[in-house]
Image: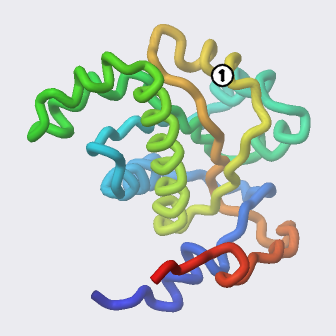
Amino acid sequence: MTEITKPDADLLFNQAHTHTAWLDKPVDDSLLKKAYDLAKMAPTSANCQPMRIVFVKSKAAKERLKPLLDKGNVDKTMAAPVTAIIAYDMKFYEFLPEFFPHSPGMKDYFAKNEELAKTTAFRNGSLQGAYFIIAARAMGLDCGPMSGFNNDGVDKEFFSGTSYKSNFLINLGYGDASKLFPRGPRPEFSRFCQVLS
């Protein structure tokens, strides 16, 4: 297997930033689909696939989200072409017979253990949200992931009648690089990592 090329590493990691200011340039729905289709291929426990996404794009949809945002997140979210609500399905296990067919008992395993199902949904939904950020960057989009919103309010407004729970938001579009903050420092490997051999 070949190592990632420098241009690809720069696109996905080294030169990518969290954006808070956006160019007035629309995001085509096909890019959102391509990013999702790429992100879904990354690993989850028992292929559980708990991530659910609502792409808030229209002015009317943004107005529904606006009162649920913390004050500091309003302007940047209203200016972003798209805001993805990254959620996870607490009843992801209902789909395991389809997504993990070689283990027929897996659905009941989670259905009978609410705490395990909750932990699994949150962990893997978070992983998938991170995968989606990388996939969106691979599609040429800039990302502004954030918390700072009323989770219960978002769940009521966007996920009423479902078993979905909001996790975090990602503003998506084409960032205004002239308004980026300087990149924060990152720790050296030896500072926070160990290799036990």
The C terminus - image quarter: bottom left
Position of residue 194 measured from the top left corner of the image (x, y, whole percent) = 59, 77
Position of residue 55 measured from the top left corner of the image (x, y, whole percent) = 54, 37
Q: Secondary structure at mark 1?
A: helix
Front-lying residue, 160 or 63: 160
Judging by the rendered image, the residue that carries numbered circle 1 is 154
Res 101 visible: yes
Position of residue 12 measured from the top left corner of the image (x, y, whole percent) = 55, 73
List the single residue furthest toward the right. 71
Q: Is residue 99 above or below residue 153?
A: below
Position of residue 102 measured from the top left corner of the image (x, y, whole percent) = 9, 40
**Position of residue 19 in the picture relative to residue 56 (left or right):** right
Q: Is residue 75 above or below residue 175?
A: above
Circle 1 packing at 10 Å, graded few (<14), some (14-19), many (20+), is: many
**Position of residue 20 in the picture relative to residue 124 (left or right):** right
Front-lying residue, 117 or 173: 117
For the point 45% across and 90% down, the residue is 5
Q: Tell me how the rendering is colored.
A: rainbow
